[in-house]
Amino acid sequence: MRSYHAGGLRSRGRIRNIARAGVEEIVATGCWTSIQPREAAALPNVRHVVTNDKKDYLVPEVLGLPRETFDLEPMDRVPIPGLHRRTRAFIKVQDGCDNRCTFCVTTIARGEGRSRPLADVINDINAALAGDSKEIVLTGVHLGSWGQEMNFHLRDLVKAILRETDVRRLRLSSLEPWDLDADFFSLWMDARLMPHLHLPLQSGSESTLKRMARKTTPDSFRGLVKAARAAIPDIAITTDIIAGFPGETDDEFAETLDFVREMQFSGGHVFSYSPRPGTGAAKMKAQIKPEVRKRRNHILQEAIGESGKSYQEKFIGQTMSVLWESASEYGEYGWRMEGWTGNYLRVSAVAPSPRWNEVDEVTLPDSKSGVFFGTIVRLSE
Ligand code: SF4
């Protein structure tokens, strides 16, 4: 969604390269193709354009056969992650979105929201665990809407996973604030849920949020963050912000900056607004000059950087569990390990042997440029 321009450029470049390499029949598919099908069709040697909503039927469509000819496997299913021996398995439980945030191309690119059945999700998680993935991350384009069409809520899925699988670390990816209530955070009484929430704010100004068609306000966002912090001590809360949304006045930007400072996020991404073809915001008057977007982006990044640093400082001297995600030889010292705590602190330490995909206890003496250089005090068995 956010990398649309880069994705578009990349897709175009790849298709041209493939054509130059001599491939005479190219099938274009994916997000960029779904947004700009005519442009994709005009590229050299593109014979078929298959938009995302038809991707499940790509093979019969291209071969001109009836759909029933094939025993269809949904195309958006991620490969069973454990088989690739990843430390963290990203399990996609949902796709598409029914909202219409005015800056977002998701509904155009990915279609309406739809959830994967609970039993399929549990199967994939069990497969990932059997493949020795140590952490499961639930993902989706609009993860918080999982189960809506089946009269379920995401909390039902989380409860079922905790009840029916042997998952040791479970993490949720981005969640829209309006999908959650204070009660949702009682799930974290189970320590297997990692203390990290990514809640996209986008703007701290009520009027800008209205133009964005976001279903939240600064007040309700504040209430949610307060409830999360009361229920989950030391939780990391990260966010996304858009700088320079159309019509964003100096006052609105000041409101956002104040709100971002007040929220004390532990990290986040700031995106300079960039119009996406076909979206409501792209047609809005009063587009903000690129240099103003850039300046505001910089100021917001600084604010998030400062609160992120204060958050990290709270953990200096503590001993925490770290899942090692990479190991590289470190000469006579052994191995240099890199990994993450449950609340997403980046940690590096030296170990006598590679500890990749293990969860060890590490003391965190200090951090430099966002990385804690720790000492392993207890190895997992
Ligand atoms: S809720 Fe998220 S995915 Fe859906 S339209 Fe808004 S920004 Fe896009």
Image (cartoon, helix red, strand yellow):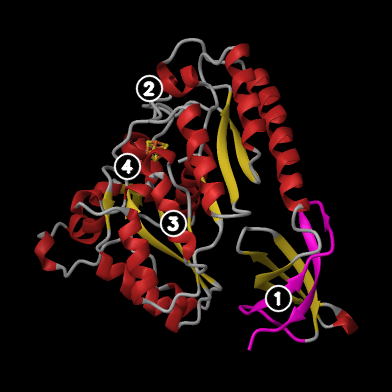
> Is residue 372 located in the magenta-colored stretch of the structure?
yes
Of labels 3 and 4, earlier in sequence is: 4
> In this view of the protein, can residue 44 be seen by the observer?
no
Front tag of 4 and 2 = 4
Q: Residues within 10 Å of mark 3 (few under 14, many from 20)?
A: few
Q: Secondary structure at mark 4?
A: loop
Question: Magenta residues, as a range?
Answer: 353-381
Residue bearing mark 1: 361
Disc number placed over residue 186 in the picture, else none = 3
Specify the quadrant of the image occupied by residue 68: bottom left
Residue at 35%, 57% in the rendered image: 155
> Is residue 56 located in the magenta-colored stretch of the structure?
no
Q: Nearer the viewer, residue 281 or 171?
A: 171
Disc number placed over residue 97 in the picture, else none = 4
Front tag of 1 and 3 = 3
Disc number placed over residue 280 in the picture, else none = 2
Is 187 left or right of 287, judged from the image as shown? left
The response on whether ligand 1 sits within 8 Å of label 4 is: yes
Of labels 1 and 4, earlier in sequence is: 4
Q: Residues within 10 Å of mark 1 (few under 14, many from 20)?
A: some
Residue at 68%, 78% in the rendered image: 360
Residue at 47%, 46% in the rendered image: 11
Disc number placed over residue 25 in the picture, else none = none
Of labels 2 and 3, earlier in sequence is: 3
**Residue type beneath disc 4:** Cys
